[in-house]
Image (spheres, rainbow, N blue to C red):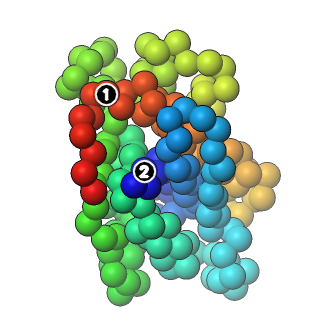
Amino acid sequence: MKVVSFDFEMAGLNADFALLLCGCFQTWNEGRPNKTIIFRGDEMPSYKTRPWDDRQLAVALREEINKADVIVGWNSKLFDVPFLNARLAYYGERPCERMKHIDLMYQARYKWKLHSARLESVLDFLNAPAAFTKTKMKPEQWVRAIRGEKKAMDYVVDHCVRDVKALDWVFTHMRHLVGVIHP
């Protein structure tokens, strides 16, 4: 069974007024290092002539999600997947297939009852190694990435990669809360 941690970064919070910037995936391997798969909007063929068109990125993210039997995200049931499906709908594309979807934010909120259900708070609570700390995103970097500055986009992608690695590490520590996983 293929279990995949994922994270997306967007140019805004609402799919009708924003677009996808990038997405990262990592196959869960019980805490052992694994290759991270990265999709960047600025590396899609359409970006050179239509940088506002995130159709190719949306389709690529959907196809990667559909390869998994189980997806693991953070606030992904209310944000990442609905945002992606809205962007796909905008382009007349089919949505992500239905599959087992574990949103660890809910495990942290309802099974551990911490002061905050933010990923950063859970990492602190679990005393995560420095390699799994989140980066701080400054609004200026975000805006520069949206406007096409490569260095800023590299930072946004690095932020996404760190998030998915941290999520994968947290899943290793929260896996017992999920119970039996059936695709």
Under mark 1, the amino acid is His
Relative to 21, is 153 on the left or the right? right
Under mark 2, the amino acid is Val
Which percent across, then down, holds residue 80?
39, 54
Find disc 1 in the rendering and name its residue.
176
Residue at 55% x, 79% y: name it: 56
Looking at the rendered structure, the secondary structure element under dot 1 is helix
Q: Residues within 10 Å of mark 2 (few under 14, many from 20)?
A: many
Reply above or below: 153 against 111.
Answer: below
Q: Earlier in the sequence, mark 2 or mark 1?
A: 2
Reply above or below: 67 against 182.
Answer: below
Which percent across, then down, holds residue 29?
53, 41
Q: Are marks 2 and 1 in contact (CB under 8 Å)?
A: no
Q: Can you see residue 159? A: no
Q: Which mark is residue 166?
A: none
Find disc 2 in the rendering and name its residue.
3
Which percent across, then down, holds residue 112?
26, 18
Looking at the rendered structure, the secondary structure element under dot 2 is strand
Give the farthest residue toward the right: 151
Which percent across, then down, holds residue 170?
46, 29
Relative to 32, is 65 on the left or the right? left
Q: Which sits in the foreground, 18 or 179?
A: 179
